Amino acid sequence: MSEQLEGEIDTVMIEQRLFPPTEQFSQQARIKSLAEYQTLYDEARRDPTKFWETQAREHLHWFTPFSETLQWEAPFVKWFVGGKTNASYNCLDAHIAAGRGDRTAIIWEGEPGDERKLTYRQLHSEVCRFANVLKSLGVQTGDVVSIYMPMTPELAIAMLACARLGAVHSVIFAGFSAEAIADRNHDAGAKIQLTSDGLYRRGKVLSLKETVDQALAKSPSVKKCIVLRRVGNDVSMQPGRDFWWHELMEQASDDCPAVPLDSETPLFILYTSGSTGKPKGIRHTTAGYNLYARRTFEWVFDHREDDIYWCTADCGWITGHSYVVYGPMTAGATVLMYEGAPNFPAEDRFWDLIEKYRVTILYTAPTAIRAFIKWGDHHVDKHDLSSLRLLGSVGEGINPEAWMWYHTKIGGGRCPIVDTWWQTETGGIMMSPLPGAIATKPGSCTKPLPGVSPRIVDDNGHDVKRGRGGMLCIDYPWPGMLRGIWGDDQRYRDQYWTKVPGMYLTGDNARQDSDDYYWIMGRIDDVINVSGHRLSTIEVESALVSHPAVAEAAVVGKPDEIKGQAITAFVTLRVEGEVEELRQALKMHVRKEIGALAQPDDIRFTSALPKTRSGKIMRRLLRDIAAGKEQVGDTTTLEDYTVLARLRDDED
Ligand code: WT7
């Protein structure tokens, strides 16, 4: 390894495989070749303001045109100043006005198997009625509406009804605790709560209303609560505070024109937990976010009229906001929504849905892909997946091994995979292959989208040499970027704009290879320093996952007197084996794949890894476990405490 500058990271993973799109795919694509991508990218780079100005004029409806495209007083940005638009209008009315009201907007399937379909016209009518319901309970432009609901069409309806009025939605994933809801409601100053009686999960009924009742006891700002009847379980309704969704809807008119809103009107807050401390309310606004979600959806998923598009994310996450609701619906797409678990009634539910609805585009997360691999190929083999033409991945890096499985087993070798890198903060996809234009490499998010200007820098803010890892930053504003942290400008500055002056700090490390492809190397905090060499967790994890016995791996550093840090790997297995033998085999495997430096000192087998509710491995916790420390900080996002307890026990 060559001499290392401060803040640079070594790379040990060299991926040679290249998968160009088929000619047939490219010919029909919106962007057909690398040259075409490059032209678009260069055009945006030469004059980003002009580029986004044209995009906004062509791809959003304006009640009043904007007079200025960009006001940039770092770190505060305003896009499309003086214009008036409405995201709900762009998602609904625009299609009806264009004569496309009878297109299917949502195909929905509940976990028990119940089905619904809504055209854009029907969805429009529901959204208008619900917006009138919100108005009748006193909701006005600027009010915060807290949403804690299952993945039903009503969740999307609620979001779009808020957007119609300029009320700010704060969707809280329906797996969070009462405490987490109360914290978020308090921070946001929410006025009203939307929820349901319960939801179906893995064949069981979970009561949401009970959790909400506990949360509302600690949410003094929330005065009203609307309850959707989903499962029909008994709930207690507090007179004067709680109302049934269906009762209010009965009386509501479906005449509710979308309010013309200033471009920078807040559209939503979405809380992310970050690695420590109190959750941050990421604030997104109307026009810029809406435009960015739409264009990135169209570019990355190469959307066409006849696509049946399925993003498996819950609307409780940014992926659900941007790529279930605002992106696809502004583009007029047909979106499949599924309520439940991937393994109910059996581990083939996703493949069953794809076959049944002839899904053409599937967008899911590496954590799900690794679970499918573990559950076994026979679940996939039972189904006809020939309708699929494009696959996507989001949320974490996808290990090359899992990528190859996704490519061959799900994509039948014919579907490009778009590995999309982005964040809650970025509002939409920042780096991804354009599937008709950019050849993919397993594990790389390839190239930035038009209008996105990434930089990789060392601790002093200097660009690192090609091939070296460093901090990934964005050096120019884009329309989808966060506008701040709700109620905390100082934290916004500190978190994103201080460490590298003048640039947005993503918090991830990355490198560029000799083809200028980008490789995300994990979070900055996750870097392991072995004998002065800074290694990225994902590379070591990918080496472990490439061993046939391994399903999942998480790698962390542990303090070591001699090396600075030693590597501890937590591993789940696809098949049980002789533990001591396997431990040696895995060490040798990593040594062979990437070298002695990256060989784990300690390998611990576990039946599951602790994950956040959105499926990310909690490396901070694993670091504490590896170091033998007690766990500290905010744990409301811990998926499974028992996993943690089990890991601790293993130690004793
Ligand atoms: C973090 C953002 C992206 C929307 C859903 C998660 C990691 C995300 C990738 C990818 C490698 C990825 C990054 C990022 N991440 N996508 N394709 N390759 N890492 O949003 O919860 O805000 O998380 O997820 O570390 O910073 P989020």
Image (spheres, rainbow, N blue to C red):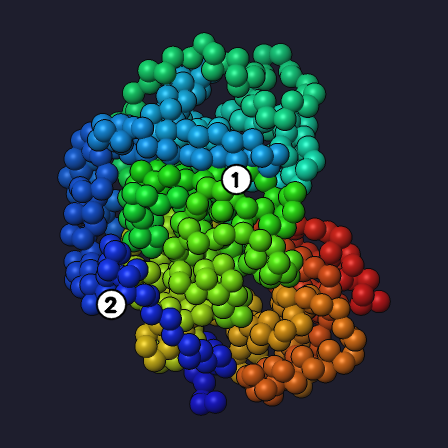
Q: Position of residue 560 (x, y in %)?
A: 68, 80
Q: Position of residue 399 (x, y in %)?
A: 52, 68
Element on which disc 1 rests: strand
Is disc 1 surrounded by few (<14), some (14 to 19) or many (20+) residues within 10 Å? Answer: many
Q: Is residue 459 above or below residue 116?
A: below
- Taking the image as shown, residue 577 lies to the left or right of residue 42, namely right
Looking at the image, the residue that sits furthest to the bottom is 2
Q: Of marks 2 and 1, which one's residue comes earlier in the chain?
A: 2
Element on which disc 2 rests: helix
- Taking the image as shown, residue 82 lies to the left or right of residue 591, namely left
Dot 2 amino acid type: Leu
Dot 1 amino acid type: Tyr
Which residue is the site of mark 1?
Answer: 338
Q: Which mark is residue 34?
A: 2
| Residue 483 in view of the camera | no
Q: Which mark is residue 606?
A: none
Q: Position of residue 23 (x, y in %)?
A: 28, 65
Q: Residue at x 55, y 84 (%)?
A: 594
How many marks can you see? 2
Is disc 2 surrounded by few (<14), some (14 to 19) or many (20+) residues within 10 Å? Answer: some
Residue nearest the viewer, comparing 203 with 455: 203
Q: Is residue 635 above or below residue 329?
A: below
* Quadrant in the picture for the C terminus: bottom right
Residue nearest the viewer, comparing 349 with 443: 349
Q: Residue at x 59, y 86 (%)?
A: 592
Residue nearest the viewer, comparing 414 with 465: 414
Q: Position of residue 603 (x, y in %)?
A: 71, 75
Q: Is mark 2 within 8 Å of ligand 1?
A: no
